């Protein structure tokens, strides 16, 4: 059974989430959250130090799920066989994990990518690109170490652009409310297969250069 403090905290989170999703971070005030939740303005600060902290708490379930997905992909990348990305099993798992996050947290995705100005997440896209570029470069290094006969010469900037592309794929899906779940599933499947074919072609090109 929840205590009164736990119930008040949950009311604040629920109220703040509704307000943030409707208006974005910047235009929502703590006074507005107070009025809609019925919790006194001064009392809110007994639960949250700032609007920014409340915003982080609202987005925490999504961020945890998203990070879990990223960790799973990082662990999968420990398989440094060059044909991993082209395997049907890997593609199916990638599509499944993407869809799981999109279906459960689509409103939060849109909020994070399009309406976080003024919050601690206003540069989230850039941070995501940087983190994924770093992970991708680490993965390429592992492939080189394991596959000594394969000459891998893919530019850092190309890998960076691939990460920019991936983040913009997420933004586009989040920003198009008219897309149905079926349409999103089809698009993600197309994107994953297209990207896999591109990586396969690059690796084959690198292998051909090595043989020459």
Image: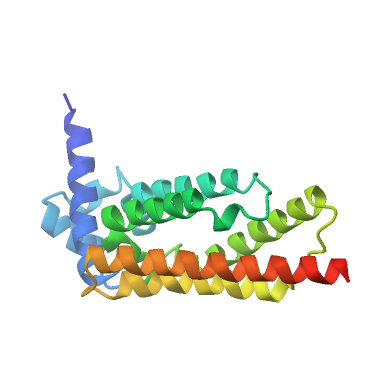
The residue lying toward the viewer, choosing from 176 and 86, is 86
Q: Position of residue 76 (x, y in %)?
A: 57, 45
Image check: 26 left or right of 209? left
Q: Position of residue 67 (x, y in %)?
A: 47, 49
Q: Residue furthest right?
A: 212
Q: Is residue 209 above or below residue 136?
A: below
Q: Position of residue 112 (x, y in %)?
A: 37, 65
Q: How many tags in the picture?
A: 0
Q: Quadrant of the C terminus?
A: bottom right
Image check: 19 left or right of 76? left
The residue at the point 18 percent across, 54 percent down is 15
Q: Quadrant of the N terminus?
A: top left
- Residue 94 seen anywhere in this rendered image of the structure: yes
The residue at the point 30 percent across, 43 percent down is 47
The residue at the point 19 percent across, 50 percent down is 14
Q: Is residue 103 above or below residue 192?
A: above
Which quadrant of the view contains residue 29?
bottom left
- Residue 25 seen anywhere in this rendered image of the structure: no
Image check: 82 left or right of 167? right
The residue at the point 46 percent across, 74 percent down is 168
Which quadrant of the view contains residue 19?
bottom left
Image check: 46 left or right of 196? left
């Amino acid at each position: 059974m929840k205590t009164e403090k736990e119930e008040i905290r949950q009311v604040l989170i629920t109220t703040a989430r509704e307000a943030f999703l409707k208006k974005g971070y910047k235009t929502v005030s703590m006074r507005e959250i107070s009025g809609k939740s019925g919790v006194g303005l001064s009392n809110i600060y007994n639960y949250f130090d700032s609007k920014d902290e409340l915003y982080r708490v609202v987005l925490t379930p999504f961020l945890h799920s998203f990070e879990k997905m990223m960790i799973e992909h990082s662990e999968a990348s420990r398989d440094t066989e060059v044909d991993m990305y082209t395997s049907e099993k890997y593609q199916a798992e990638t599509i499944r994990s993407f869809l799981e996050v999109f279906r459960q947290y689509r409103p939060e995705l849109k909020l994070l990518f399009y309406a976080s100005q003024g919050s601690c997440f206003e540069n989230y896209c850039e941070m995501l690109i940087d983190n994924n570029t770093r992970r991708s470069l680490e993965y390429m290094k592992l492939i080189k170490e394991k596959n000594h006969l394969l000459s891998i010469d893919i530019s850092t900037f190309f890998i960076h652009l691939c990460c920019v592309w991936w983040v913009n794929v997420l933004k586009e899906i989040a920003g198009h409310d008219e897309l149905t779940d079926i349409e999103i599933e089809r698009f993600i499947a197309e994107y994953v297969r297209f990207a896999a074919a591109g990586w396969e072609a690059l690796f084959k090109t690198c292998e051909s250069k090595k043989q020459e």
